[in-house]
């Protein structure tokens, strides 16, 4: 594994938010974070709220520019839009054009990836079937339920057949059935050799599907390693490991 | 039993609804009747305003009326018209104060001095042909390709009607602007041959402005020039003169023009009808108010010496054919 | 370019699925037809006032469509958070700005074509057809002017986050330019010293949108605009549009967008 070029590489990343108008001091969201994710891995990116997970993801996706350090996807600096050519991104909440139909929105994203219309059609039909929306594909998204919108989100994240999937809290707000479906899809992608980088608060879920995890707290990387190694070395399950690392008294947790 | 009680309930319910509705209606009508006269006190002058436009716009409608009156003039010149900035610059360049009367009532002046075609524009040629001046910069030079830079007029006897909608709107907005009625009547009657329409416009103007000697004057002119109804014309011009006498105690530079027109029109009509004595009487009165009485005096002398069939001098023939501004002696 | 066109397609779809255009068109058509049915002094030959009112309505409608649509594009993407899945694709922010601009401009152009088509048809049915050549020039110049307005509104949307504030400011600026910009040199000429110089500077810096307004030529049946001047006006609009779009891209380029 270590001889392989990482798909995702973060080097000494630092992100500061400037002071706001109310006179607050500049906020350091991420401090000297370095991370590598290798092909075929399912990587869990963990941390409590405000730890810097979302900021790190925002840097990877080009939403926020780092104050220091660099990040690379497939060896290309994330500042370049082309770095996102082979990734799929599923945001925590569904944010799509409500006046478009599922089919139109998938076609739009397919065009952004430069897919030919024949290829786009083929993938759209396959994905709509995968997320079980083929029957409702001509209805505007504003008439979709939350679960249906989440499935559109998943389909759009897969439209370019990505090699790396970045999932931000993919199971948040879903019912147990929905969570199970997402877990199944992650597992399936893993079996297909895809790389998955996702953040989650569901530690049980992470323990089930992840190969490796990183735990960040207050913008700093606290620990990184294979799930079974962490569990073995701490003589505890992942949840207890997590709580110990972020300094929460485990006796209280127990 | 149940069915009967249900029916009774429905009946009672229906009657109750009907009675309640009727009561409410009665109360509403009574309230309206009681409130109506009081509301006039609350709303003040607006309650007595002429209509919806007056209520909505208040006195601001006069500004709009003026705007549309100018718009009619813009149409007459096929869009070739100086902006307020051009007018101000011209005033500065010529070292004179701006003359809003010229631009805003130019169309009215047109009505007065137009005899056949628009010779009257000669007098304004220096003003208008060069209001644009030479281009001041490259933007100005480029801009002239996209705006009207040719001074043309509506003058084919048909297209002049294009100015009428704006005059109509101006009338609606400000029914007390007499100039709009006389102007519309001029274009309708004399240029478009719609005498009935012209008279209707003037009558409408008279209803809103019963004390307007100008409208009475124009009505009289219409009666004489288009209907050859001398009796009616006389009656109207007499009425116009009475209004004039009532309004003005003495002759001054402003009110002299209308009086002079009345006298000139009357004199000319009497002369045409062969009532020489009457004609001489009116020419003589005109001589008193004219700033150039010598020309009128010559006319009176000619009348006295040659009697009715004497041919008119060419310059005097136009007197009375147009309204005031065209009178050379005034 | 393919990505820009994809974004453009979404904006056009948005416009024709919203009701703004239809409402404005129906309103314009109703007012025009109502006015066409009115007889002033029993005269049926009057068409210029109808042209004037129709063109004024077209100008107002087009301005409303262009400014409101352009002003909400990027703020709406941010507010509804659709910007995140969008920028997570291999799309640069410059392409987003360009795509949004092209989308609004083309959509407004389509709406404008419908409006001008209606205008020319009404003229034909009234028995006083306008010059089709000048009609085309009027449409084209109007559309070019809207390119400047749309790019200005997009730039404004990156300066003022509330679309309503941006729209209002855009309306004020555009109306101010249309009414006053062409006269600033005259005013500057009458003002001595620094103020005059500043006003002259403003006169040369402002985009002269009034250049694109050939309504008077159309209403009063003047000959078409010389093609050379027509081309220069197009170039002039392109320069200002490019400047505004570059400024918009510059502002958007480094703008942090936190999920």
Image: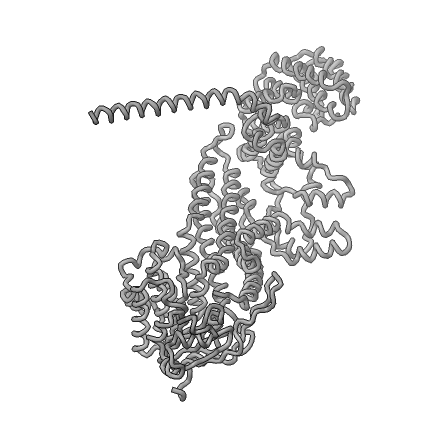
Query: Which sits in the foreground, C157 or B293?
Result: C157
Query: Which sits in the foreground, C158 or B302?
Result: C158
Query: Which sits in the foreground, B55 or C203?
Result: B55
Relative image position of residue B159 (x, y in whole percent): 54, 35
Which residue is painted at 50% across and 66% down in the image? C258
Q: Residue C126's image quarter?
A: top left
Relative image position of residue C15 (x, y in whole percent): 43, 53
Which residue is painted at 64% across and 51% down in the image? C181
Work out whether residue C100 can be spotted.
Answer: yes
Which residue is painted at 47% across and 40% down in the image? C128
**Color scheme of the displayed model:** one colour
Which residue is painted at 72% across and 43% down in the image? B88
Instruction: Examine the rendered structure and indicate whether residue C54 appears above or below residue B29.
Output: below
Most distant residue in the front direction: A251
Relative image position of residue C123 (x, y in whole percent): 46, 41
Q: Residue C204's image quarter?
A: bottom right
Instruction: Say left or right for B316 vs C142.
Output: right
Relative image position of residue B185 (x, y in whole percent): 58, 26
Most distant residue in the bottom direction: A3
* The N terminus of chain C lies in quadrant: bottom left
Instruction: Examine the rendered structure and indicate whether residue B265 appears above or below residue C94.
Output: above
């Amino acid at each position: 594994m270590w001889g392989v070029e990482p798909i995702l590489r973060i080097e000494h990343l630092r992100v500061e938010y400037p002071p706001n108008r109310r006179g607050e001091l500049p906020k350091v969201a991420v401090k000297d974070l370095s991370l590598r994710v290798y092909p075929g891995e399912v990587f869990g990116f963990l941390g409590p709220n405000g730890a810097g997970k979302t900021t790190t993801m925002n840097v990877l996706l080009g939403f926020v520019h780092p104050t220091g350090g660099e990040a690379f996807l497939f060896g290309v600096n994330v500042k370049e839009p082309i770095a996102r050519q082979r990734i799929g991104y599923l945001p925590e909440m569904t944010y799509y054009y409500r006046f478009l139909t599922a089919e139109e929105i998938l076609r739009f994203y397919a065009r952004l990836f430069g897919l030919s219309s024949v290829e786009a059609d083929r993938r759209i039909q396959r994905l709509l079937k995968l997320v079980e929306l083929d029957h409702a594909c001509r209805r505007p998204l504003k008439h979709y339920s939350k679960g249906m919108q989440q499935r559109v989100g998943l389909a759009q994240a897969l439209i370019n057949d990505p090699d790396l999937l970045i999932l931000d809290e993919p199971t948040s707000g879903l019912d147990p059935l929905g969570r199970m479906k997402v877990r199944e899809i992650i597992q399936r992608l893993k079996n297909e050799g895809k790389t998955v980088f996702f953040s989650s608060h569901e530690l049980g879920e992470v323990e089930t599907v992840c190969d490796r995890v990183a735990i960040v707290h207050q913008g700093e990387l606290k620990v990184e390693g294979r799930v079974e190694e962490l569990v073995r070395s701490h003589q505890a399950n992942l949840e207890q490991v997590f709580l110990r690392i972020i300094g929460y008294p485990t006796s209280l947790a127990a | 039993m149940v069915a009967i009680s249900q029916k009774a309930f429905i009946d009672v319910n229906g009657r109750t609804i009907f009675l309640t509705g009727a009561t409410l209606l009665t109360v509403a009508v009574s309230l309206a009747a009681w409130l109506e006269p009081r509301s006039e006190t609350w709303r003040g002058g607006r309650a007595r305003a002429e209509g919806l436009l007056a209520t909505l716009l208040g006195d601001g409608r006069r500004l709009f009326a003026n705007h549309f009156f100018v718009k009619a003039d813009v149409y007459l010149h096929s869009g070739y018209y100086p902006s307020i900035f051009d007018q101000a610059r011209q005033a500065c360049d010529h070292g004179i104060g701006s003359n809003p009367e010229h631009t805003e009532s130019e169309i009215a002046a047109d009505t007065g001095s137009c005899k056949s075609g628009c010779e009257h524009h000669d007098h304004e040629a220096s003003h208008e042909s060069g209001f644009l001046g030479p281009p001041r910069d490259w933007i100005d030079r480029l801009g002239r390709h996209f705006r009207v830079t040719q001074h043309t007029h509506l003058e084919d006897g048909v297209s002049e009607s294009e100015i009428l909608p704006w005059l109509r709107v101006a009338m609606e907005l400000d029914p007390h602007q007499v100039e709009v009625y006389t102007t519309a009547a001029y274009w309708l009657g004399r240029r478009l041959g719609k005498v009935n329409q012209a008279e209707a416009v003037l009558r409408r103007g008279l209803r809103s402005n019963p004390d307007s000697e100008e409208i009475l004057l124009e009505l009289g002119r219409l009666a004489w020039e288009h209907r050859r109804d001398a009796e009616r014309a006389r009656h109207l011009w007499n009425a116009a003169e009475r209004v004039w006498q009532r309004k003005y105690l003495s002759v001054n530079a402003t009110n002299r023009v209308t009086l002079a027109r009345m006298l000139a029109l009357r004199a000319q009509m009497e002369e045409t009808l062969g009532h020489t004595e009457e004609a001489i009487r009116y020419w003589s009165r005109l001589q008193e108010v004219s700033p150039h009485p010598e020309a009128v005096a010559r006319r009176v002398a000619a009348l006295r010496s040659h009697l009715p069939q004497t041919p008119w001098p060419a310059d005097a023939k136009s007197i009375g054919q147009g309204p005031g501004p065209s009178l050379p002696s005034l | 370019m393919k990505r820009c066109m994809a974004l453009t397609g979404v904006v056009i779809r948005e416009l024709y699925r919203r009701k703004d255009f239809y409402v404005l068109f129906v309103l314009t058509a109703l007012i025009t037809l109502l006015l066409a049915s009115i007889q002033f002094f029993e005269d049926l030959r009057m068409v210029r006032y109808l042209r004037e009112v129709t063109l004024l309505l077209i100008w107002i409608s087009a301005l409303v469509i262009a400014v409101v649509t352009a002003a909400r594009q990027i703020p709406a993407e941010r507010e509804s958070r659709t910007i995140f899945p969008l920028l997570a694709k291999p799309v640069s922010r410059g392409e987003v700005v360009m795509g949004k601009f092209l989308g609004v401009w083309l959509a407004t152009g389509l709406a404008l074509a419908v409006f001008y088509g209606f205008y020319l048809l009404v003229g034909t049915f009234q028995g006083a057809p306008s010059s089709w050549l000048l009609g085309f020039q009027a449409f084209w110049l109007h559309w070019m002017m809207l390119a400047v307005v749309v790019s200005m509104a997009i730039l404004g949307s990156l300066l003022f986050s509330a679309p309503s504030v941006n729209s209002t400011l855009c309306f004020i600026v555009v109306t101010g330019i249309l009414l006053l910009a062409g006269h600033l040199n005259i005013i500057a000429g009458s003002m001595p010293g620094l103020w005059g110089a500043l006003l002259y500077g403003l006169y040369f810096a402002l985009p002269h949108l009034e250049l694109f307004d050939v309504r008077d030529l159309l209403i009063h049946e003047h000959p078409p605009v010389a093609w050379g001047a027509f081309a220069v006006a197009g170039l002039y609009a392109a320069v200002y549009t490019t400047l505004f779009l570059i400024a918009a891209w510059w502002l958007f380029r480094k703008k942090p967008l936190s999920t």
